[in-house]
Amino acid sequence: MDNIILIIGIVLILTACIIAVTERIRTERIIDSIEKMLRAAMNGNFSSESFDEGRLSKLEAELSGFLSSSSLSAKNIENERDKIKSLISDISHQTKTPIANLILYSELLENAELSDIDQSNAKAIHEQAEKLRFLIDSLVKLSRLENGILALEPKETPLEPMINGIVHQFKEKAEAKGLELKADKTDAKAVIDEKWTHEAIANIVDNAVKYTDKGSIKVSVVPYEMFIRIDIKDTGIGIPEEEHAKVFKRFYRGNAVKQKEGVGIGLHLAREIISEEGGYIKLTSKPEAGSTFSVFLPKK
């Protein structure tokens, strides 16, 4: 009797061991299969045809279905991006000459002997044509930046020549409004793509001039151990706190500036450029108390 109980016990133990080993092998196979699926998905090579559905567990089958739909969605998004990129490129190409002609003929009209009303109309045509050119140029730059067509090439660069160039670029426009536009001297350097960083800072300075009716715009540089901060401070209309995040969105126009010139893409483009360089932009502002845009750039 004792021998029978012992044999039964041994059989049960062996059976349990066999079941445990079998389940372990099955679990390892499932994990290996899932890892293979995930690696294929991350490399962009996932295809449900690569996996035998008849051998897949329910978990593997569900994951396979999810990855297949995700892969399809990613391809659809990529196709849509290509279409948008192509559309923007076509718009830029097809509108370049007509816009240039609009600007040229409006300038000729402004210099002609016209009535005050006609002069005003010619000026309005000129301004709107310039706005359209800026919008299309900005969209093309943004599209190329987002799609990796134009890659940034950061290198250690002195900031003073770039900042002085931006001040010179907008000095006449500022003086026409009775504003003082100035920059402090600096020997600071940052790791940037100078052309694109010039674009970003210039967009911020341009906005400062647009939305400041009296006072000044000052550009200053504050060095830290790991980064450089460029402050663009104005005495303009200011921005409510609830709009601080919104002003960086594409085409956003705050209530206080909807009647002023601008298309609402300059700050969005600036943020995208600075982010690509490993930096960021901080806004400090209150209504009627001016604004300070602080651009943080990597130093190393």
Image (cartoon, helix red, strand yellow):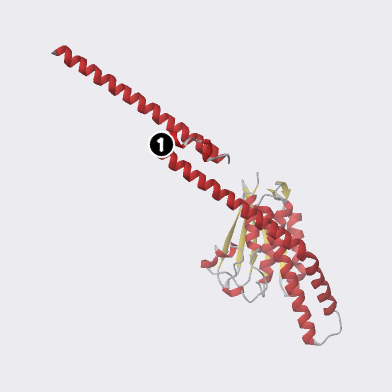
Task: Give whichever of 257, 63 is nearer the camera.
Answer: 63
Judging by the rendered image, the residue that carries numbered circle 1 is 57
Q: Give neighbour class at mark 1: few <14, some 14-19, many 20+ (Cα, 10 Å).
A: few
Of the 4 image quadrants, the one containing the C terminus is: top right
Q: Quadrant of residue 135?
A: bottom right
Horizontal side of 3 relative to 45 (left or right) equals left
Q: What quarter of the picture does the N terminus occupy?
A: top left
Choose between 164 and 102: the one closer to the eye: 102
Residue 121 in the figure: left or right of residue 18: right
Question: In the orientation shown, which residue stands out farthest toward the top?
Answer: 3
Left or right placement of residue 237 versus residue 180 in this view: left
User: Which of 297 and 178 lies nearest the eye of the viewer?
Assistant: 297
User: Amino acid type of disc 1?
Assistant: Ser
Quarter of the figure with residue 289 = bottom right
Q: Residue at x 62, y 55 (%)?
A: 80
Q: Secondary structure at mark 1?
A: loop
- One can see residue 273 in this view: no
**Residue, far front:** 54
- Front residue of 174 and 249: 249
Residue ranking furthest to the left: 1
Is residue 172 among what the camera can see?
yes
Image-quadrant location for residue 25: top left
Q: Is residue 103 above or below residue 156?
A: below
Q: Look at the picture and state if 227 lies above or below 138.
A: above
User: Residue 296, position in %: x, y?
Assistant: 62, 53
The percent coordinates of residue 30 (x first, y second) are 43, 33
